[in-house]
Image (cartoon, grey):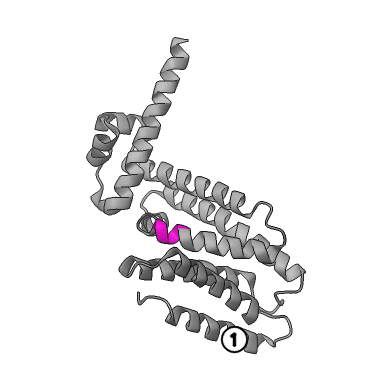
């Protein structure tokens, strides 16, 4: 019983550290947030943090993995029972826009340090976690292609990049000038609209790409300036 109690106490300590670190990285960024800040928020010593996570980058790794794991679970829950791939895509894009706007400061930490960290484990994990999230969108896009709603002439990775890139652009603009949830949801619908309209199978390859680019420009011009 004592051993079980110690494990439970240790898990509670890890959860407190993780919550404090997540908030510290969100509020101050990775560089400015210190392990002393995290320790104070979790009400533990810095030594306890290093005992559990080894280093500050180890702490970032745990925060990042926990965040992506929760995000993917919530995304799966959001699209469950949504019917065909077109409706699933609408739900996914709306989910992504609202999520990245809400957590833009944290998303920037992951993007910057996940790509360029000196810790190769952080970089490797970021790539795998990103593929897990974007891969779910690619699967829905592939289903749309199978249904004949997306032509073979536009690479699916390009459509994926439109979705995630436009979402980040919206988040950057919303950080400067806040937008209502209704406005954000409408922007998500516009992204889906340009994906479907700009990649119809009946269009020629060059014309289809040009149409997609033009429609993306129109959507982004209606968003807040970055």
- Residue at the location (72% across, 76% down)? 152
Residue at left 43%, top 80%?
A: 222
Q: Is residue 37 above or below residue 124?
A: above
The image quadrant of residue 59 is: top left
Residue under the point 36% across and 28% down: 13
**Residue annotated with mark 1:** 211
Q: Is residue 145 above or below residue 22?
A: below
Q: In which quarter of the image is residue 194?
A: bottom right
Q: In this view, does 89 lie above or below 202?
A: above
Q: Nearer the viewer, residue 134 or 41?
A: 41
Left or right of 12? Residue 125 is right
180 in the magenta segment:
no
The answer to whether 148 appears left or right of 102 in the picture is right
For disc 1, the neighbor class at 10 Å (few under 14, some 14 to 19, many from 20) is some
Residue range (magenta): 99-103
Give whichever of 4, 131 is nearer the camera.
Answer: 4
Q: How many marks?
A: 1
- Quadrant containing the C terminus is bottom left
Q: Where is residue 163 in the image (x, y as percent from the top left)?
A: 54, 69
Q: Is mark 1 on a helix, strand or loop?
A: helix
Q: Main secondary structure of the magenta part?
A: helix
Task: Identify which residue is drawn at 40% across, 33% down.
Answer: 15
Return the residue nearer the eye: 206 or 19: 19
List x then y, in percent, for residue 157: 60, 69
Q: Looking at the picture, how far across and down is residue 183, in whole percent?
A: 45, 70
Q: Is residue 119 above or below residue 96?
A: above
| Extreme residue in the right direction | 147
6 sits left or right of 147 in the view: left
Q: Where is residue 17 in the image (x, y as percent from the top left)?
A: 34, 35
């Amino acid at each position: 019983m004592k051993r079980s109690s110690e494990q439970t106490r240790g898990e509670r300590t890890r959860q407190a550290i993780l919550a404090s670190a997540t908030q510290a990285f969100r509020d101050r960024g990775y560089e400015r947030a210190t392990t002393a800040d995290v320790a104070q928020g979790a009400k533990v010593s810095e030594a306890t943090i290093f005992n559990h996570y080894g280093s500050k980058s180890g702490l970032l790794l745990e925060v990042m993995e926990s965040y992506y794991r929760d995000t993917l679970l919530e995304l799966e829950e959001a699209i469950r029972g949504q019917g065909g791939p077109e409706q699933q895509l609408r739900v996914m894009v709306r989910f992504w826009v609202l999520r990245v706007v809400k957590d833009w400061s944290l998303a920037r930490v992951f993007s910057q340090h996940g790509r360029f960290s000196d810790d190769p484990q952080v970089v490797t994990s970021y790539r795998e976690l990103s593929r897990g999230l974007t891969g779910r969108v690619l699967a829905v896009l592939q289903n749309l292609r199978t249904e004949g709603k997306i032509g073979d002439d536009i690479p699916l990775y390009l459509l994926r990049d439109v979705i995630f890139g436009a979402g980040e652009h919206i988040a950057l603009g919303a950080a400067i000038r806040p937008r209502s949830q209704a406005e954000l949801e409408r922007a998500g619908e516009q992204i889906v609209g340009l994906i479907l309209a700009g990649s119809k199978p009946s269009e020629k390859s060059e014309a289809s790409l040009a149409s997609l680019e033009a429609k993306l420009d129109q959507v982004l011009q209606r968003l807040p300036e970055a």
